[in-house]
């Protein structure tokens, strides 16, 4: 299988619902895509401007300032101490890494890539790109022989599920039994809401409570798109097993996967400033507190959603039927069909809309109940 064999881009199927929603007298409220709407922090934008004299090729491995900032961030924000620059690597956003990791690891036909049952579709795309077999399975005991790569996503997209230290530890143990690399997509880790995550940091796969001091076979992936509104910068990184990082670095050098130098400078500044992250989290908390009760008032049950940027909701009907009802209200959501075959009755509501649009969505949903 190759790129030309990939299925049509799924979001094209939502276009008719979006067109109907746009005809609402008060306009569309688009809660379908998790693209940030708030401004890039000034401190980060200024760092980018200051680094625009980028006449030389950037290093694939990243500047020493960026790598140090990543190491310091893991210690300060994620409780992961002892990382060295050799354990980290910047990437051009996280999506390209998710899509390319099976290729960069040398996977191919006969190999299996495991991903969550409710999953960001790029995990499957990356497997199919190299001819590997994608398997959707949350229970580590069900992961099959022949698994070479396991994707964990916590907090999850689309379902907002957060895995505990014990669950992460069990996942690592099973991956090691299988001889598989385990990669944890942690892009929403700063956004914990309910249960213990209302007061405790969401744990990383690299947390010493999970792996001790042994990072063998373990990677964590993070993006600044959500916490710092840098989606347009394509600013992300990975960390973990130094031997795997070195292998990925060599492959990325050959492929020219270099993060632009101004973006590297901006990332280092963003990683060192916690104030803007806290401010952004409070924006999302306010929007969530407004939207969630309105979604429930409209007859939806919200499942998981204890972390991340989404409400994962169902009314016990096919997701396309829910989208049909929402389109009449001028609201667009994401159908569960896009996130695997196991949740055809769920829809995903994003918190990435302006305060005004979130309030308007809440008004419409509440009025419909």
Image (cartoon, rainbow, N blue to C red):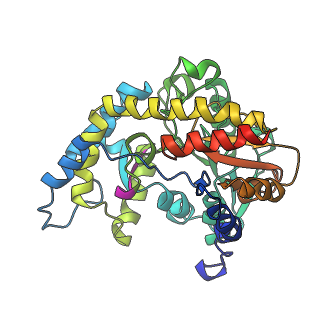
Point 67% across, 55% down: residue: 330
| Residue 321 part of the magenta-drawn span | no
Give how far across and how far down residue 134 sits, in percent.
72, 60
Q: In this rendering, would 150 be left or right of 93?
A: right
Location of the N terminus by quadrant is bottom right
Most foreground residue, 297 or 223: 297
Residue 204 seen from this side:
no
- Dividing the picture into quadrants, the one containing residue 228 is top left
Point 12% across, 68% down: residue: 55
Residue most toward the front? 25
Most foreground residue, 34 or 161: 34
Point 40% across, 50% down: residue: 236
Q: In this rendering, would 350 be left or right of 276?
A: right
What stretch of residues is rendered in magenta?
232-238
Point 73% across, 39% down: residue: 367
Q: Is residue 223 above or below residue 74?
A: below
Most foreground residue, 28 or 153: 28
Give how far across and how far down residue 115 sits, in percent.
68, 50
């Amino acid at each position: 299988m190759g790129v030309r064999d990939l299925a049509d881009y799924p979001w094209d199927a939502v276009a008719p619902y979006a067109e109907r929603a746009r005809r609402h007298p008060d306009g569309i409220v688009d809660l379908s895509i998790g693209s940030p709407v708030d401004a890039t922090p000034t401190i980060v934008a200024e760092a980018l401007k200051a680094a625009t004299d980028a006449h030389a090729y950037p290093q694939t491995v990243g500047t020493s300032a960026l790598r140090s900032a990543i190491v310091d961030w893991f210690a300060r924000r994620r409780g992961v101490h002892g990382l060295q620059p050799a354990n980290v690597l910047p990437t051009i956003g996280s999506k390209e890494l998710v899509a390319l990791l099976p290729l960069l690891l040398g996977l191919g036909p006969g190999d299996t890539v495991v991903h969550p049952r409710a999953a960001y579709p790029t995990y499957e795309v990356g497997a199919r790109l190299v001819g590997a077999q994608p398997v959707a399975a949350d229970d580590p005991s069900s992961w099959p022989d022949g698994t070479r790569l396991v994707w964990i996503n916590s907090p999850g997209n689309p379902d907002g599920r957060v895995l505990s230290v014990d669950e992460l530890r069990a996942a690592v143990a099973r991956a090691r039994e299988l001889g598989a690399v385990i990669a944890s997509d942690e892009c929403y880790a700063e956004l914990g809401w309910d249960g213990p995550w209302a007061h405790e940091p969401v744990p990383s796969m690299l947390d010493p409570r999970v792996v001790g001091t042994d990072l063998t076979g373990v990677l964590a992936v993070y993006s600044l798109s959500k916490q710092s509104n840098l989606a347009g910068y394509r600013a992300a990184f990975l960390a973990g097993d130094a031997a795997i990082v070195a292998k990925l670095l060599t492959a990325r050098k050959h492929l020219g996967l270099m993060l632009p130098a101004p973006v590297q400078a901006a990332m280092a500044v963003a990683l060192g400033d916690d104030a803007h992250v806290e401010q952004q989290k409070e924006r999302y908390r306010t929007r969530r507190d407004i939207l969630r009760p309105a979604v429930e008032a409209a007859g939806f049950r919200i499942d998981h959603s204890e972390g991340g940027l989404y409400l994962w909701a169902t009314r016990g009907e096919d997701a396309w039927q829910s989208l049909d009802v929402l389109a009449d209200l001028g609201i667009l959501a994401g159908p569960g069909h896009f996130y695997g075959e196991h949740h055809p009755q769920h829809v995903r509501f994003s918190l990435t809309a302006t305060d005004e649009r979130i309030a308007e969505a809440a008004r419409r949903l509440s009025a419909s109940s």
